[in-house]
Image (cartoon, grey):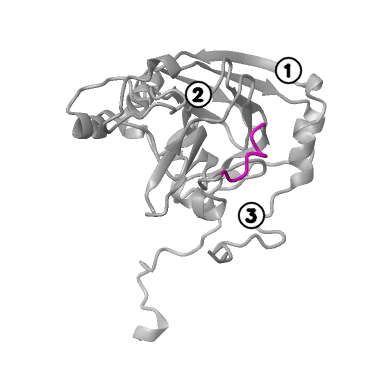
Amino acid sequence: MLDFPAAYQATEGSALDVDKAFYKRVIEKPETRTLVESLVVPIRSGRSWTVPAGHVFRIVTMEGPQVGDLNIWNLHNPRERLWASRTRQLQAAHVTTFDRLWSNLPYLRPLVTITDDSLANYGVDEYGGRVHDLLGTRCDPYVNKMLTGEDFDFCCHSNLTRAIAPRGLTEADVHDVLNVFQCTGLNQQDQYFMRDCPAKPGDYIEFFAEIDLLCALSTCPGGDLSVPLWGPDARDPLDVCRPLRVEIYKLEESRLEGWHQPEVAYAKYKGAHGMRLEKPDWEK
């Protein structure tokens, strides 16, 4: 199959032209960081946490392969949240170091930038699979009921719903996710597939918070996805479920030199979606 250029190209100085020198500086000399919070997300559950702008957070596979479903919001305005589909277009369907996760309209700005990824060299496997997936979304009890006829309360959608309830948010605030450590792709029939997670104990992905964030993570009830969840060979994958750890770090002020929080898109757009009182030139 021939290759074809990406639709969204990063031109010099554009929002897609990431300052790699800055983000490399963020991960240099890790001994200068200060761990401000560490939490464990047990199997088949969800947890939420906050991250101040200019801090980093890391998700770690503590005991071995495990998929996690990540949601991200603006801490002060949960209407601004991760926009998975636009991130796929602006970055890639699977993300890694220096990729950014973008927020929805009318905000459209990077919520985080990926600064480090221990699986960055995984590349493309023999099936076309890649890690850290934006193609798919969270598992949920509604699809599960449709496919199995059974009720199950610990799908990622439900885990995220429980995780954010103490923050005053609801099921309606749960949105399309970044599937961290998940290996996925499209098969020759152009259908979505999920492979067993390639992560080992201690693997991680790290994010730099571009604004103040609220985050939530579900440990997928499918665990490392080595067991079929649906179909004739499906069984309960409880034995391949493992916890994940989240670490939040404060950086030295010197590491942040030259960085500023990104501006919301609506502050720059001066139009009104064509809803002005005066007629456009071609209708006069």
Is 43 a magenta residue? Answer: no
Q: Residue furthest left?
A: 149
- Spatial CA distance of label 3 from label 1 is 29 Å
Question: Which residue was labeled with disc 3?
Answer: 15
Callout 2 amino acid: Gln
Q: Is residue 79 visible?
A: no
Q: Earlier in the sequence, mark 1 or mark 2?
A: 1
Q: Secondary structure at mark 3?
A: loop
Q: Quadrant of residue 36?
A: top right
In the rendered image, residue 33, in percent from the top left (x then y), is placed at: 76, 21
Q: Nearer the viewer, mark 1 or mark 2?
A: 2
- Residue 197, how many percent across, how many down? 51, 30
Q: Residues within 10 Å of mark 1 (few under 14, many from 20)?
A: few
Mark 3–mark 2 Cα distance, whole angstroms, equals: 32 Å
Element marked by disc 2 = loop
**Residue matched to label 1:** 34
Between 259 and 177, the one nearer to me in the picture: 177
Q: Amino acid at mark 1?
A: Thr
Residue 21 at x, y = what percent? 79, 44
Residue 203 to residue 38: above or below: below
What is the span of residues highlighted in magenta in the rendered image? 118-125
Label disc, if present, on residue 66 of the rendered structure: 2
Amino acid carrying mark 3 in the image:
Ala
Q: Earlier in the sequence, mark 3 or mark 2?
A: 3
